[in-house]
Image (tube, grey):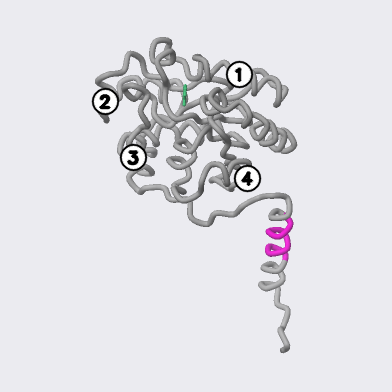
Amino acid sequence: MYHRLTMENLTELKLLRDLYHYKTLGYTYFSDIKKPIITMEREMDLPSCLEELSLTAHQCSLCTLSNSRKQVVFGEGNPDADIMFVGEGPGAVEDETGRPFVGKSGQLLTKIIESTLDVKREDVYIANIVKCRPPLNRVPSKEEAQKCLPFLMKQIELVKPKIIITLGATSYQYLSGDYESAISKIRGEMIQFSHALLMPTFHPSFLLRNPSAKKYVFLDMQKVKALL
Ligand code: URA
């Protein structure tokens, strides 16, 4: 069959070639990262500076987690970080201190960051899906996550990380909207997410219970390091 080569299909061919190239490098393309309209609307109303955004989060009472929290754990780190870590939600120590990942799993996360990525903890940005501790460290509900997600989306918009590393299944699911993929299968894949790449990996608290899985996180971090 004869195909006329126009400028338009030449561009398409080049795009296709590039996509195949990225695929061989291990990238995955998700055309449909689901983002609820309500989340986008609220995001637009939030302040466009991290300090003010933090103040707004500290006054938030949009879900019942605000009734039981001791402190809002907004997030911390380099506001110009290339790498952002996203956990599930604050635990007991984080609730006491107002800082993300400072308990046992936080100490492991710091070790992972500093030993595998060769950067200081202060050089990355660390946040959570929900900013208030779920009672008894239960998994945040979909509703709680949706109420809180605009804060995280705004943090992503302001920090503009190159790579977002979600820690554990809950963080990956709520941020990507992909509830189908098992974390053991999807971890280590690079997924286009807005202007950043998103890479799911295991949560440090899972690694504390399953030290043999640390090797996978090590491999995932090597991938991240190669992209910096
Ligand atoms: N686990 C999380 O997911 N986030 C924290 O900040 C601490 C523990």
Which of the two residues, 46 or 59, is positioned nearer the viewer here? 59
Crowding at label 3, few (<14), some or many (≥20) Cα neighbours within 10 Å?
A: few
The reply to whether dot 4 and dot 3 touch (C-beta < 8 Å) is no
Disc 1 residue type (three-letter): Thr
Precedes in sequence: disc 2 or disc 1? 2
Seen at 37% across and 31% down, the residue is: 139
Q: Where, quadrant-wise, is the C terminus in this rendering?
A: top right
**Residue linked to disc 3:** 142
Seen at 57% across and 41% down, the residue is: 198
> Seen in the image, is 179 located left or right of residue 30?
left
Disc 2 residue type (three-letter): Ser
Which of the two residues, 18 or 199, is positioned nearer the viewer here? 199
Q: Nearer the viewer, mark 4 or mark 2?
A: 4
The reply to whether dot 2 and dot 1 touch (C-beta < 8 Å) is no
Magenta stretch prevailing secondary structure: helix
Magenta-drawn segment: 14-21
Please, what secondary structure does the residue beneath circle 3 have?
A: helix
Quarter occupied by residue 137: top left
Which of the two residues, 152 or 20, is positioned nearer the viewer here? 20
**Residue linked to disc 1:** 110
Locate residue 132, reporting x and y percent: 36, 23
Query: Residue 27 has which mark?
Result: none
Disc 4 residue type (three-letter): Met
Q: Where, quadrant-wise, is the N terminus in this rendering?
A: bottom right
Query: Residue 190 has which mark?
Result: 4
**Residue linked to disc 2:** 61
Between the C-alphas of marks 1 and 3, the distance is: 28 Å
Please, what secondary structure does the residue beneath circle 1 have?
A: helix
